[in-house]
Every structure is written in C-alpha cells, then in structure tokens.
Amino acid sequence: KMLDILKLVAVSAALVYLNTKAKSRVAKTNYWTMNTGLGLLLFAAILDFTDGIRALDQVAVVGQRAAHHDLLEDQLGDIPGFALFALGALREIMRRDEKPAAT
C-alpha cells in the first residue's frame, strides 16, 4: 500500500515538473512523448492505488475483481507508459549530447 502511494506521488510530481519547469527546455516531440508516458503511468498508479480500497471493488474498471483491471493497469498503463517516457527522455538526452560539426 505504501509503495502504491509513493508511486502515485512520484509520477504526479514528475508530471507537474515536466509541465511547469521543463516544458520550455525540452523539444516539442520529446515533451509530448514523455508527457503521454507519464500520463499512462499516472493512470496505472491510480489503478494500483485503488486496489487497496475495498469499497471500490464493485466499480467496473477500478475494482480489483474487475476482469480488465490487470490488463488496463499493466498492458495499457505501466508498460507503454514507461516505454514512451524512456523513449522521450533518451531522445532528449541524445539531442542535447549532439555537438555541432566542426567545419
């Protein structure tokens, strides 16, 4: 339960930081790639956090007993979210490491 809260807070903080402080310093394509990845990770973190709330078990998507819960959390949230965020971050690192060619 504590790790779920930590994941939710960390992903939320990263999303807020990207959209406030880092937006002007990141290339537009990389910004949208990382933003989409963090959004998917936030979606998965919310689903993960709601696993511990028994009152939500009756809700179709959020409830832990829902048939599609694990599919949404892992296959739609965590895996593509991490992949998109990592892709955007690596592309931004490579963009910053490029040095102008000496003539």
Image (tube, rainbow, N blue to C red):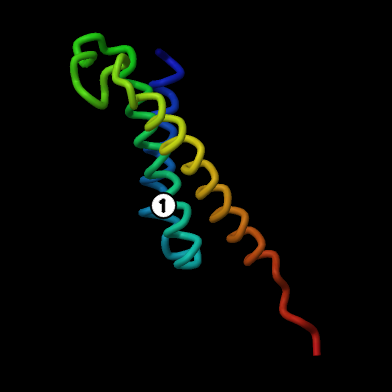
Which residue is pictured at 51% across the width and 37% down the height?
A: 79
Q: Is residue 47 above or below residue 34?
A: above
Residue 7 rendering spot, x and y as whole percentages: 44, 27
- The residue drawn where x is 63% and y is 58% is 93
Q: Between residue 54 and residue 19, name the one nearer to us.
A: 54
- Horizontal and vertical percent position of residue 71: 41, 29
Q: Report the number of numbered marks.
A: 1
Q: Residue furthest top?
A: 54
Closer to us: 68 or 9: 68
Residue 33 image position (x, y, % from top left): 46, 56
x 39%, y 42%: residue: 40
Q: Which residue is mark 1?
A: 35
Q: Is residue 60 left or right of residue 40?
A: left
Classify 5 as above or below 16: above
Quarter of the rendering occupied by the N terminus = top left
Q: Quadrant of the C terminus?
A: bottom right
Percent position (x, y) of residue 77?
42, 37
